[in-house]
């Protein structure tokens, strides 16, 4: 017997997606002008959901770690609570319905399938912006931004602040296809290749000029868009401080920062080495065990967010499980991690292995840049402002916040969207 589809209105959907407040109806549905842009709905079969419940019920737990909870990785007691909630209370159908209130599409560019959300604003003169996620996020981390971008009048802004939001999934991530090799033989999920794919995607959507925001891998892609397409980019914005020229530390605060980086590199970067060198070996466990997939992701949510050691201060169990479910039901956690291999993060001492060709800047124009400085990854110290000896002339905004970790779009969406409005505001008529 088929499971009835849950009834869910737009307000309920937006609340589930993290966009709480007095919420209007979203913008009218996007029309598909090109024949190779296909509307897409997320749907997981009842059979798959039953298989997941069986796997959760039969989880084989490892012995508990020694020492303080979380000191050797994801805490066993927390995982048992999370898996029990997943099995007994989490309702995928409700979250699936919420996700499907947004306008999803797929397209193929140079053989690479790309899934993306294209949410248009109802306000005239809205600015197109492409928003790129990182790891272990996915489009999930950008969901609370979308209503704030497209309908600013409902979220503390004016109609003049409106954006058309394009939110693509990186190759290998949920509902985008497995990364392939490009015609040149380069991996289609290296940063330079994704920059090219995003440029072509915005072409397909008819956006000749647009802004860009991204975090984690998305930050490098966003910066690369400005380097590769300076005549098309209105501006680029990423979390963190502006670029700085490397130099020896001069103050106690700067020395403490570099010492914390040394500690971070010892204790917190092993994931980069395994994902950058042998991603296929770990893919078997991440694809076969829902508990294993959840444990791998939740450790980063806790270690990288501004949660003071309690992951549920920033992410509810439903939010965590929606992220993991997107990976699980699309069988992509094992392919998502390949981006580390494609970008040469095997960490050979003194060099990087398999480093792809670097993005080649086009022309001498410098695109306006914004840097939105949140607390960032909390398992290492925050870079002192003093390390930036000189702010580059094309950096028109350097905001500074005392909260918000590595996932600002879902941790502090209102702060982030206010930064985006302030940064892009002067360039809307350019």
Image (tube, rainbow, N blue to C red):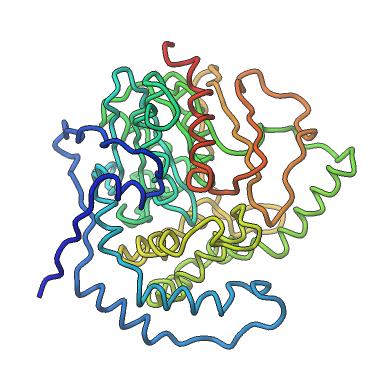
Q: Quadrant of the N terminus?
A: bottom left
| Relative side of 369 to 84, left or right | right
Query: What's the residue at 13%, 37% (across, down)?
Result: 35
Q: Where is residue 277 in the image (x, y as percent from the top left)?
A: 55, 64
Query: What's the residue at 82%, 53% (across, down)?
Result: 259
The vertical placement of 249 against 236, above or below, is: below
Q: In which quarter of the image is the C terminus?
A: top left
Q: Out of 133 and 266, give the one closest to the viewer.
A: 133
Q: Out of 239 and 159, give the one closest to the viewer.
A: 159
How many marks the image carries: the answer is 0
Residue 353, by quadrant, is bottom right
Query: What's the residue at 38%, 26% (across, down)?
Result: 153
| Relative side of 43 to 406, left or right | left
Q: Out of 430 and 358, give the one closest to the viewer.
A: 430
The vertical placement of 68 against 361, above or below, is: below
Query: What's the residue at 58%, 88% (across, down)?
Result: 63
Q: Position of residue 326 (x, y in %)?
A: 35, 60
| Relative side of 87 to 267, left or right | left
């Amino acid at each position: 017997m088929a499971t009835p589809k849950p009834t869910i209105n737009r307000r309920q959907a937006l609340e589930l997606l993290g966009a709480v407040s007095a919420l209007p109806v979203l913008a009218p549905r996007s029309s598909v002008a090109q024949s190779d842009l296909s509307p897409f709905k997320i749907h997981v079969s009842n059979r798959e959901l039953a298989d997941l419940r069986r796997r959760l019920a039969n989880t084989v737990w490892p012995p508990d770690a020694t020492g303080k909870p979380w000191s050797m990785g994801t805490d066993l007691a927390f995982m048992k609570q999370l898996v029990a909630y997943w099995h007994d209370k989490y309702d995928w159908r409700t979250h699936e319905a919420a996700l499907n209130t947004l306008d999803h599409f797929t397209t193929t560019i140079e053989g690479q399938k790309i899934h993306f959300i294209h949410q248009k604003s109802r306000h005239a003169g809205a600015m197109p912006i492409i928003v790129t996620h990182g790891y272990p996020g996915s489009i999930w981390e950008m969901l609370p931004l979308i209503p704030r971008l497209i309908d600013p009048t409902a979220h503390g802004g004016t109609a003049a602040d409106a954006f058309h939001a394009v939110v693509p999934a990186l190759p290998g991530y949920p509902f985008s296809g497995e990364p392939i090799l490009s015609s040149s033989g380069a991996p289609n999920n290296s940063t330079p290749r994704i920059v090219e794919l995003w440029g072509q995607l915005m072409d397909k959507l008819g956006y000749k000029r647009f802004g860009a925001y991204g975090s984690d891998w998305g930050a490098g892609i966003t910066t690369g868009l400005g380097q590769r397409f300076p005549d098309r980019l209105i501006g680029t914005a990423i979390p963190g401080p502006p670029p700085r020229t490397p130099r020896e530390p001069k103050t106690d605060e700067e020395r403490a920062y570099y010492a914390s980086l040394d500690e971070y590199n010892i204790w917190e970067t092993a994931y980069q080495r395994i994902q950058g060198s042998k991603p296929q070996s770990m893919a078997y466990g991440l694809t076969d065990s829902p508990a294993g997939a959840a444990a791998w992701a939740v450790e980063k949510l806790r270690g990288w967010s501004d949660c003071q050691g309690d992951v549920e201060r920033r992410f509810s169990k439903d939010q965590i499980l929606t992220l993991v479910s997107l990976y699980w039901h699309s069988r992509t956690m094992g392919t998502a991690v390949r981006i580390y291999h494609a970008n040469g993060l095997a960490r050979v001492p003194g060099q990087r292995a398999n480093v792809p060709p670097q993005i080649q800047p086009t022309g001498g124009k410098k695109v306006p840049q914004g840097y939105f400085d949140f607390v960032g990854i909390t398992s290492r110290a925050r870079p002192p402002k003093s390390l930036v000896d000189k702010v580059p002339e094309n950096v028109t905004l350097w905001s500074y916040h005392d909260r918000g970790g590595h996932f600002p779009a879902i941790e502090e969406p209102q702060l982030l969207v206010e930064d985006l409005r302030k940064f892009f505001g002067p360039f809307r008529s350019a």
